[in-house]
Image (spheres, coloured by chain):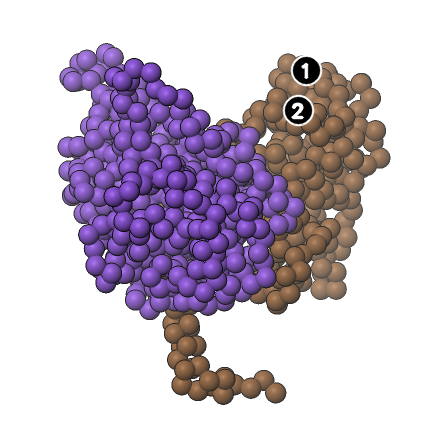
Amino acid sequence: MGYTKDVLLARLEELKIDFERYDHPVVLTVEEQAKHVGNLGGALTKNLLLKDKKHRLYIVSALADTKVDMKILSQRLGLGKGGVRMAPEDNLRQVLQVPLGCVTPFALFNETASAVSLLLDQGFKSKKSCYFHPLTNDVTIALSSSNLDKFLLSIGKQPAYVDLEASPVVGKDNPPDLADLVPTSALSFPEESVENVAPTHAPTKDVPKEKTCLPDVKAKPKVQNKVTSSSEGKVPTNGANVEKFVTDVLEMISPLFISEVSKKLNIKEDELSPILDGLKERAALNVDSLASLFKSAAYTTGFDAGVKTMLNYGKSGLPSRE
Amino acid sequence: MASAAPEAEQEQVVNPWEVSAGKGGIDYDKLVDQFGCQRLDAAIIDRIGRLTGRAPHRFLRRGLFFAHRDLNEILDLYEKGEKFYLYTGRGPSSEALHLGHLVPFMFTKYLQDAFKVPLVIQLTDDEKFLWKNLTVEESKRLARENAKDIIACGFDIERTFIFSDFNFVGGAFYENMVKVARCVTYNKVVGIFGFTPEDHIGKSSFPPVQAVPSFPSSFPHLFPGNDQLRCLIPCAIDQDPYFRMTRDVAPRIGYQKPSLIESRFFPALQGENTKMSASDPNSAIYVTDTNKEIKTKVNKYAFSGGQDSVELHRKLGANLEVDVSIKWLNFFLEDDDELENIKKEYKEGKLLTGEVKQILIKVLSEMVERHKRARAQVTEEMVDAFMARRPLPNMFG
């Protein structure tokens, strides 16, 4: 499961993306990688997989010598101080489907990683080429940032470049500048980054200043998707979206459950997260079924009432809006 | 091609009213060849995953839905922002639905959620009246009862229109029926469906009824002015003849050909030979079965690929090719890793048939439980709402 490097590299070739390929023994750190490709002209990168308190994942891909301050990054994302930490190994394997030491922007090629947010170092743009692992640690590929962009766009992702060393003040008058890069959900229901699908959510709201339990940050990448289908001239309401509802409910329960259990039974939150993730997946079907029928019941009541109003009173049964 | 010797092996028969296999079960390769549809391959399944931003449904991953017509075209258009709608249906011949009946609906719900498109569901109560010994009232009643089980599958009421032929045929729908009828000779339907001169004319005039939901103009309250909207039909492969005919006619009357995505037959409990039959209660698990009944049926009737004795089994392992429990788990067990593990250990003889059956029983019980719970929530008013000729403003939202 998960794409192999060969499938990825074949896709790059299909897309006519230029890259250099270097094979070497398995490397687990940037230092080791440097021994093999360090003086071949490209720029080494370090790739971190971060996780926030709502179990949303972020890949931060930076030049090896860019300083990445997690506290500042966390604030810029609107997650408060200390809102992100390194993600556990399980997430690497389950979500990114890459081995240890192999975090890479190319992991977004895997469907399981569709909800992972990617932050790219602005510094990539000024380098001729940068080194990344193509889903495996025994190969390094070098490509320019514009070619990386080409790949990302081909899988429906908008590349988001960030000045990772900047430390803007975040406060009442300065909203977190990277808030748009926070994914909309923790489960693998992705946001609609495919260009042509009309967005169901309202346009990006302002990030609420306090953290709330519900993930009402409707994050979209900074560069908005283009054309919305014009037949959707209707007001974009959230609609009664069952999947989103199920996600929200499970999301609301998870952190409470984890924090309660970890406190009472003295188990580390990290150990609980994957168990809860599995549980959420299993519960999702049943909760989805409950929610669907609930929605249908609510709609039915409304529909019935609407029909009766029209039958008994015609249009005068409706309030006027003047 | 004329068949040579008169004692040629029994040919398999697959059409909407008869499915019977030669020796060794249905030859799907031959069927695909004979029908002229295409197989779904890993590339197209991947593509679906990418376009919908979620893992492809396990029915795709595990090859239950395995063939298609022009699915790539629909995907091409979808990628460019052009929508489509889904069309599926049921012939309400009995009140009791079994899991094999639910399969296309489970898959259709996934398609609706994944692609965020509307769906029309046709209940062919007229067809059942014509083919079975039912009264019109009974056919209509069965249609409504079946609608409840369909609703219980969790379709989005904002995007789904259910209709029964006795209720809906007329107006633009009927106009399309007649347009189709004018393009198909009697000889043609005989060739496609095997009608004989002794068959009453109700039968031979039925096919257009099942054809025209493929055309958006049949539903003026849903798709006004959108005559070229594409249609995707998920169905079992025995329905293919209807849509071969439809695709043949469509361009001649100025409409788009519907695309299809087709499934295999779900193997009956007693073994893979034909599709499950509503007349043999032990061939299938019904959505009304109790946990006890499920347990008994699986234990007693599910054809086993295991060996006759524990010793032999530990030594030789099981034959996965014929084991029905494994086939059913293939379709109903969500976790890929767990499934692989079970198959491996069963094949090696580490897992016994009884143990595999236990796992299957658990999976089936949960599914049936969930369905029953949902079904209990369906009221007559809810059926009315799903079947009302109402606008669906959020159908593509």
Q: Quadrant of residue A85?
A: top right
- Which residue is disc 1 drawn over? A23
Task: Return the residue nearer the eye: B378 or A223.
Answer: B378
Q: Is residue B127 above or below residue B262?
A: below
Image point 68% across, 37% down: which residue? A154
**Lateral position of residue A247 relative to residue A52, left or right:** left
Q: Nearer the viewer, mark 1 or mark 2?
A: 2
**Lateral position of residue A28 relative to residue B343, left or right:** right
Image point 42% across, 28% down: which residue? B34
Q: Is residue B49 above or below residue A224?
A: above
- Which residue is disc 2 drawn over? A9
Give the image location of residue A221, x and y in percent. Answer: 68, 50
**Quarter that holds the C terminus of chain A:** bottom right
**Lateral position of residue A153 relative to residue B210, left or right:** right
Colour seen for chain A: brown
First in sequence, mark 1 or 2: give its number: 2
Give the image location of residue A38, x and y in percent. Answer: 77, 20
Disc on res. A197: none
Q: Quadrant of residue A173?
A: bottom right
Q: Is residue B233 above or below residue A240?
A: above
Task: Return the residue nearer the eye: A175 or B119.
Answer: B119
Give the image location of residue B207, x and y in percent. Answer: 38, 48
Amino acid type at image mark 1: Asp
Image point 52% across, 58% down: which residue? B217
Element under disc 2: helix
Label the purple chain with its letter.
Answer: B
Element under disc 1: strand
Image point 33% across, 34% down: which residue? B14
Q: CA distance from mark 1 to mark 2?
A: 13 Å
